[in-house]
Image (cartoon, helix red, strand yellow):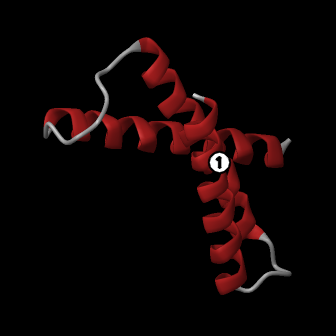
Amino acid sequence: MKKLIKHVNQLLIGASTASLIYIVALILKLDVPSLTIQNGLIVVGLGAIIGLYSAVFDSEKLSFLTALICHFVLTLSSVLFSLLFF
């Protein structure tokens, strides 16, 4: 049960961080697509998935550098997949 709560927290933190960054980019008028429901859902969903990837850092078997590389590769592959898919 504690692991489930921890994963839900990671999911929510990832989604809220992605949403915050997207809103700040919109406010600063950076080169981001306009706010639509589809774009918002993609950002929140991708942020939630990347938030779950942070569980890699909880592994005691992996060094920090290995966990960082794994997190980077997972994040990059998710972003590239979403760019190709959407």
Residue count near mark 1 (Cα–Cα under 10 Å), binned few <14, some 14–19, many ≥20: some
Instruction: Using the image, determine if residue 4 lies above or below residue 75.
Output: above
* Tag 1 residue: 78
Residues 59 and 67: in front is 67
Placement of the N terminus among the 4 image quadrants: top right
Placement of the C terminus among the 4 image quadrants: top right
Residues 50 and 79: in front is 79
Residue 34 placement, left or right of 29: right
Instruction: Using the image, determine if residue 68 lies above or below residue 53.
Output: below
Q: Secondary structure at mark 1?
A: helix
| Outermost left residue | 28
Residue 79, percent from left and from top: 57, 47
Residue 42, percent from left and from top: 53, 28
Residue at coordinates 28% horizontally, 33% vertically from top-left? 23
Q: Quadrant of residue 82?
A: top right
Residue 76, percent from left and from top: 60, 58
Residues 20 and 28: in front is 28
Residue at coordinates 65% horizontally, 43% vertically from top-left? 81
Q: Quadrant of residue 67?
A: bottom right
Residue at coordinates 74% horizontally, 41% vertically from top-left? 5
Residue at coordinates 29% horizontally, 36% vertically from top-left? 32
Residue 35, percent from left and from top: 32, 20
| Outermost top residue | 37
Q: Quadrant of residue 25?
A: top left
Residues 9 and 50: in front is 50
Count of labels in the image: 1
**Circle 1: residue type:** Ser
Instruction: Using the image, determine if residue 20 lies above or below residue 73.
Output: above
